[in-house]
């Protein structure tokens, strides 16, 4: 019941910083990102890397344990832009998801309701070059497609947001959304005009009151 109530807040767009502990390791364009899951808590996450084989199925990209049962009955919730609601929960049991072919792309957010303290490791390729994003009209989840700690999604010419758009990040420790960050006059009203600081694997819930917003992020592994 508490999980449903918390997820319901997202549909109403109430919602600022996340406390997911993370470490990033990479070599050339392939690497992995660790995020910490806490027992009986919701974590708002994203895929910070792309699959090397192009397979975005949840069974390929999100593995909660090695089949040892520690995360049995953990759930995953993804946002459906078309219906403006959360998709039915995916359940982890016996080392697999009950809907293994559901696609979770990088650049979007999802909730994991963990049943145990553990580390979730994302393994994949780091996108490079001109990376394309598009924020649809209405409510959506949004995330950085590359594993960097940076203010997101940007402002000004780099991110042509609509005035009075809002975004929210998830407070894992408090299990709640914080105050909205509002886009106005080409910048966000946070400590940085480029938006809240996100770590690799973080996501935001975006409320777009205008037209869809295409933008491009240029990234190269140094």
Image: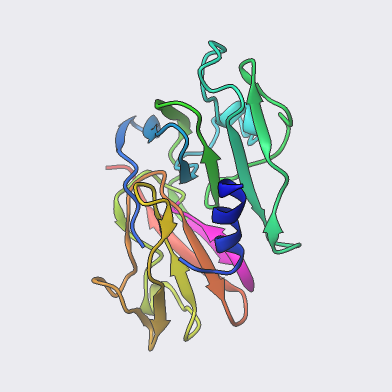
Most common secondary structure along the magenta stretch: strand
Residue at 53 percent of width and 39 percent of height: 112
Query: In the image, is residue 147 above or below residue 57?
Result: below
Residue drawn at point x = 58 percent, y = 55 percent: 5
Give the residue at x 25% y 71%: 192
Name the colour scheme.
rainbow
**Residue 48: percent from left, percent from top:** 44, 42
Residue most toward the left?
A: 191
Quarter residue 154 falls in: bottom left
Q: Position of residue 171 (x, y in %)?
A: 37, 53
| Residue 202 visible in the current orientation | yes
Find residue 72 and report its horizontal and vertical position in percent: 59, 22
Q: Is residue 84 magenta?
A: no
Residue 7, above or below 28: below
In percent of the image, x 55 and y 52: which residue is there? 108
Span shown in magenta: 131-144
Instruction: Give the image location of residue 24, x and y in percent.
Output: 31, 35
> With 198 as the anchor, is 141 left or right in this view?
right
Residue extending furthest toward the top: 68
Please tell me which residue lies in front, 108 or 38: 38
- Please give the count of numbered marks on the rendered protein: 0
Quarter residue 98 falls in: top right
- In the rendered structure, the answer to whether residue 83 lies left or right of residue 214 reads right
- Residue in front for this viewpoint, 102 or 114: 114
Q: Is residue 136 visible?
A: no
Residue 138 lies in magenta, yes or no? yes
User: Can you say whether 11 is above or below 35 in the image?
Assistant: below
Above or below — where is 105 with respect to 25?
below
């Amino acid at each position: 019941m508490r999980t449903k109530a918390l997820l319901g807040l997202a549909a109403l767009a109430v919602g600022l910083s996340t406390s997911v502990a993370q470490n990033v390791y990479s070599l050339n364009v392939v690497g992995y990102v660790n995020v910490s899951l806490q027992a009986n808590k919701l974590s708002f996450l994203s895929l910070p890397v792309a699959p090397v084989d192009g397979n975005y199925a949840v069974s390929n990209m999100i593995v909660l344990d090695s089949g040892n049962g520690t995360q049995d009955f953990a759930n995953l919730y993804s946002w459906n832009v078309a219906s403006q609601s959360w998709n039915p929960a995916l359940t982890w049991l016996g080392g697999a998801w009950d809907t293994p072919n559901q696609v979770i792309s990088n650049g979007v957010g999802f909730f994991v309701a963990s049943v145990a303290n553990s580390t979730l490791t994302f393994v994949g390729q780091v996108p490079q070059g001109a990376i394309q994003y598009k924020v649809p009209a209405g409510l959506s989840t949004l995330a950085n497609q590359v594993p960097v700690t940076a203010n997101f999604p940007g402002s000004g010419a780099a991110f042509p947001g609509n005035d009075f758009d809002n975004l929210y990040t998830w407070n894992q420790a408090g299990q709640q959304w914080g105050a909205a960050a509002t886009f106005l006059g080409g910048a966000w009203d946070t400590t940085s005009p480029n938006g809240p600081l996100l770590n690799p694997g973080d996501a935001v819930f975006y409320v777009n009151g205008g037209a869809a917003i295409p933008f491009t992020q240029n990234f190269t592994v140094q």
